[in-house]
Image (spheres, coloured by chain):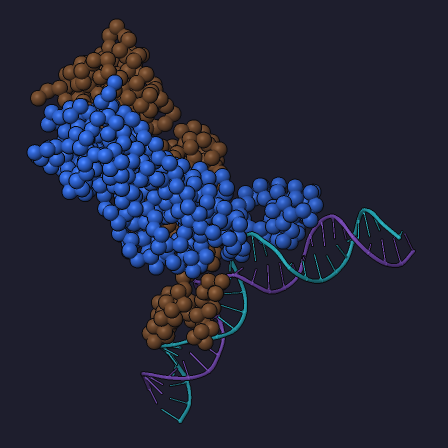
Chain colours: A brown, B blue, C cyan, D purple
Amino acid sequence: MSKRRTTLADIAEALDMSPSTVSRALAGHERISVATRRTVREMADRLKYRQNSLAASLRNGKTRLIGVLMPTINRSFFASVVRGIEDVAGPAGYSIVVTQNDDEPQKESSALDALIRAQVDGVIASLSRNTTDYSSFSELSDRRVPLVLFDRVSDRIQASQVTIDDYHGAFLATQHLIDQGCRYPVHLGGPQHLNIYQDRLNGFREAIEQAGLPFNPYRQIMMIDHTAEGGKQAAEELLARSDPPDAIFSASDWAATGAMRHLLSKGVRIPEDIAVVGFANESFTAFLEPSLTTVEQFSRKIGQEAATILMQQLEQSGTPKARKVRLKPELIVRRSSLRTQ
Amino acid sequence: MSKRRTTLADIAEALDMSPSTVSRALAGHERISVATRRTVREMADRLKYRQNSLAASLRNGKTRLIGVLMPTINRSFFASVVRGIEDVAGPAGYSIVVTQNDDEPQKESSALDALIRAQVDGVIASLSRNTTDYSSFSELSDRRVPLVLFDRVSDRIQASQVTIDDYHGAFLATQHLIDQGCRYPVHLGGPQHLNIYQDRLNGFREAIEQAGLPFNPYRQIMMIDHTAEGGKQAAEELLARSDPPDAIFSASDWAATGAMRHLLSKGVRIPEDIAVVGFANESFTAFLEPSLTTVEQFSRKIGQEAATILMQQLEQSGTPKARKVRLKPELIVRRSSLRTQ
DNA sequence: CTGATTTGTGCAAACGATTGCACAAAATTT
DNA sequence: AAATTTTGTGCAATCGTTTGCACAAATCAG
């Protein structure tokens, strides 16, 4: 059997021409006669030739590989983003190398290392929860590898950004709760060094203040772990208060779900006693009982945007102008917050 | 600025030695004196050298890249599998290239093409729903690229396989329903040319027959689209019957969820009137009302197993012995099926 | 029919890392 | 002190493609 894979040289030999001609013929170079092009293509087919992109990349400095770095692929938001990236990058002839940081800065930098070694043409990344040292990223810009950040971004890194307007989403959600007659909403927030959680909190506060309602940050903001369990614990704590809230706006669907389950198990009526709104529009939220009002953040679209921007930066050589795109989120009103008829 | 990235030659020049020595020093070659090794490593650090794996791969024929091909990454099962693959492959120094087939055979073969061109060392794949032509896969074996199939596999492709025992999972689920006193369960099945759906159906049938209950395939098996909507439609149809079932075993959690919502909205009590069991243990199923009994298929574990097998085949050169691993699923009993106290 | 283009192809040098072979210097043995 | 082994390093080829330059043959203009 032919142990070695067929190369340009093999085709050349079979056709008694030089590898250069074969290369050009396959590339559709204009100076190669149509006849030769056909012959070469046929022989290439017959020999099942596949370009060795390693060699090609080495030669021309482009791999058509794009690196993706995210906390974990294993969560619907991020998986959707990858999907969105693929939507755009795939048809453009790019392949995707996925790496994860597990919210550990150390894994982040080793993942970036791997991507650099793989000579990816560009990188799309969301920061780890604990990233404080941005030097790993500066290595990218040193090497002129275009970078697009999404969701968890930082202005301290020189890069394009794709985010959703978390502030606006939170504002809409809170305003909606107030519209429904809630007067004392509580926000389940996340780590404030991440812009997304900060923005959601700000939108929450702003909506309350604009409505002229009293606002007590100590009573109306809880920092929690954004899991179902974290939501449950928060709900427990809230119910134990002498003045439980009449609404909960969670920065995540998971915590909202956990809270909701606990409240229901304690006989609290949703939304009559306490209205609940989540964030992310996880696919299952429509099927909860009651169905959960939440904020759609168009994760797939985020990936598409990020990839589009990256593609642009890759095509136009030399122009590094960082772009910032901010998508508008959308409030999805469902039963968990719908008090009025 | 240094436009060009630093290469071995740069380090060699700075240290006034040959690239060969530098290469060996970095690789920790024993014949290089410890002193030289140190000097070289320090200079490499100072110059921020990163190996160009393209060049290295081209030279030694290994890319330390593994290709993953699946219907869509955008579904929790597959995202988890990727996670599992990463768990094993990452620490072993491999990077992952993700491609999708969207259940279209044509995309499947072009994805494989891309992987071949990228010279991946091995491939982990789940077949597209409609794969009938296996020639794209035979190109892999022609090129001696090890292949591990998972979940949706085919014996017509020469490759290792990692699956879960769908038959057993379905059997357990159905047996449980019978234990709970159900006498007339209906199965919501999927496309029978996929082994997984076939196995689930067989497990269902077998459990009924072993229990000595009557079994009418025309009344007790429905082929549906496995989405929430598909489940809802199935439920509608079942309720319209003169003899509605007393249990539903769905081949997916999504259909089970859709069915459950519809049943509840029509005043059917779950599990008293109709017990429901799903398949997959999607993360949200614990939070449905009632919480959904389902079958855990250890998706992350599947990925880990597949990667482990692939790693083995990559390390031991020349031994192609295909392995088949079949994981045991686990029944997760929750309220949607728990009739007895 | 001569000189200027155009057309079609080949040569050879990259791209960056690795490695078999060679060989000098140092260390060891006799 | 000579012979042998060990240690440390360099030379040069190689992996498979691409491409600037060169050049012959064919075509065209005058």
Q: Furthest residue to the top?
A: A242
Q: Quadrant of residue A32?
A: bottom left
Nearest the camera: A214 or B31? Answer: B31
* Whole-percent x, y for residue A85 in the image: 32, 44
- Residue at (53, 45) in percent of width and height: B50
* Whole-percent x, y for residue A264 in the image: 22, 17
* Whole-percent x, y for residue B101 in the image: 30, 50
Q: Quadrant of residue C9?
A: bottom left
Answer yes or no: is residue B317 visible.
yes
- Residue at (24, 23) in percent of width and height: B338
Answer yes or no: is residue B114 visible.
no
Q: Quadrant of residue B335?
A: top left
> Is the C terminus of chain A in the top left, top right, bottom left or bottom right quadrant?
top left
Q: Furthest residue to the front?
A: B212
Would residue A297 appear left or right of B314 to someone viewing this image?
Answer: left
Nearest the camera: A160 or A184? Answer: A184
- Residue at (19, 30) in percent of width and height: B183
Nearest the camera: C26 or B321? Answer: B321
- Residue at (44, 43) in percent of width and height: B307
When the figure is inspected, residue A270 is found, relative to residue B44, above or below; the finding is: above
- Could you tell me how many numbered marks the image carries? 0
* Whole-percent x, y for residue C23 in the image: 74, 60
